Image (tube, rainbow, N blue to C red):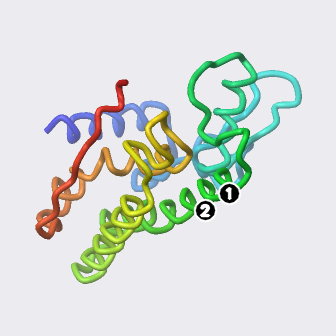
């Protein structure tokens, strides 16, 4: 019920802000500021607050960008891409791209497709992506036990939201067991 109340409140707020002449566009409404920065209206889109107002787009690029900015600002967090190993950086980028295709794309297909066979096929794609991730992982995190990598950052938002598939689409889970790790270390 909480999700429904939040959606209703968002809808009312968008109507109050005059999100457009057609009520059925509210869900897909894109702010003029977003469209000016990214004509496709895709998120994430990061833009400089001042100066040239340069823009960074695309999820994987945004994750790397934020990591680089944090390190430039003096962050002592484990880097998402190890600066000392070009081969490991390449492996992590390939893994992140595969997760993006196998888990992220299939997550949305399983969530929004109307045809049950398409949803089931998408869910099977998620499972294959998770199996590949697990098989290639080298510890508590994808690249070992030291901390999150780029591949982990691509997977975690969707792994964290797997419950939404069952909530909105019913029983898609076919006798699966997931192990979650304590990432608070």
Q: Dot 2 corresponds to which residue?
A: 94
Q: Secondary structure at mark 2?
A: helix
Which quadrant of the rendered structure holds the N terminus?
A: top left
Q: Which residue is mark 1?
A: 90
Q: Nearer the viewer, residue 173 or 119?
A: 173
In the current view of this chain or complex, which residue is farthest to the bottom? 117
* Residue that sits furthest to the top in the current view: 74
Q: Are marks 2 and 1 in contact (CB under 8 Å)?
A: yes
The picture places residue 121, in percent across and down from the top left corner, at 30, 79
Q: Is residue 90 left or right of residue 183?
A: right
Q: Position of residue 100 (x, y in %)?
A: 51, 60
Q: At x 61% / y 33%, what residue is drawn?
A: 79
Q: Residue at x 40, y 46 (%)?
A: 139
Name the residue rendered at 30%, 47% in the picture.
Answer: 161
Q: Residues within 10 Å of mark 2 (few under 14, many from 20)?
A: some
The picture quadrant where one finds residue 3 is top left
Secondary structure of residue under mark 1: helix
**Rounded to the nearest whole Å, what is the CA distance between mark 2 and mark 1?**
6 Å
Position of the C terminus by quadrant: top left
Q: Where 6 falls versus 87 (above or below)?
A: above
Q: Position of residue 97 (x, y in %)?
A: 57, 61
Q: Is residue 21 visible?
A: no
78 vs 98: above or below: above
- Tell me the tag on residue 102: none
Count neighbours of disc 1 (C-alpha within 10 A) and say few if under 14, some if 14 to 19, many if 20 or more. Answer: few
In the image shown, does 9 or 142 lie closer to the viewer?
142
């Amino acid at each position: 019920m909480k999700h429904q109340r939040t959606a209703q409140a968002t809808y009312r707020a968008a109507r109050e802000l005059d999100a457009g002449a057609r009520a059925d566009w509210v869900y897909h409404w894109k702010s003029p500021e977003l469209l000016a920065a990214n004509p496709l209206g895709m998120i994430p889109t990061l833009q400089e607050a001042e100066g040239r107002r340069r823009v960074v787009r695309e999820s994987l690029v945004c994750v790397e960008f934020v990591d680089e900015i944090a390190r430039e600002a003096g962050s002592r967090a484990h880097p998402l891409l190890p600066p000392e190993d070009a081969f490991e950086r390449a492996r992590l980028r390939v893994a992140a791209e595969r997760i993006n295709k196998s888990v992220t794309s299939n997550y949305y297909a399983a969530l929004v497709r109307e045809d049950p066979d398409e949803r089931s096929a998408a869910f099977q794609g998620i499972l294959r992506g998770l199996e590949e991730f697990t098989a290639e992982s080298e510890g508590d995190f994808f690249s070992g036990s030291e901390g999150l990598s780029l591949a982990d950052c691509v997977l975690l938002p969707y792994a964290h939201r797997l419950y939404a598939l069952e909530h909105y689409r019913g029983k898609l889970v076919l006798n699966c067991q997931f192990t979650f790790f304590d990432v608070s270390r």
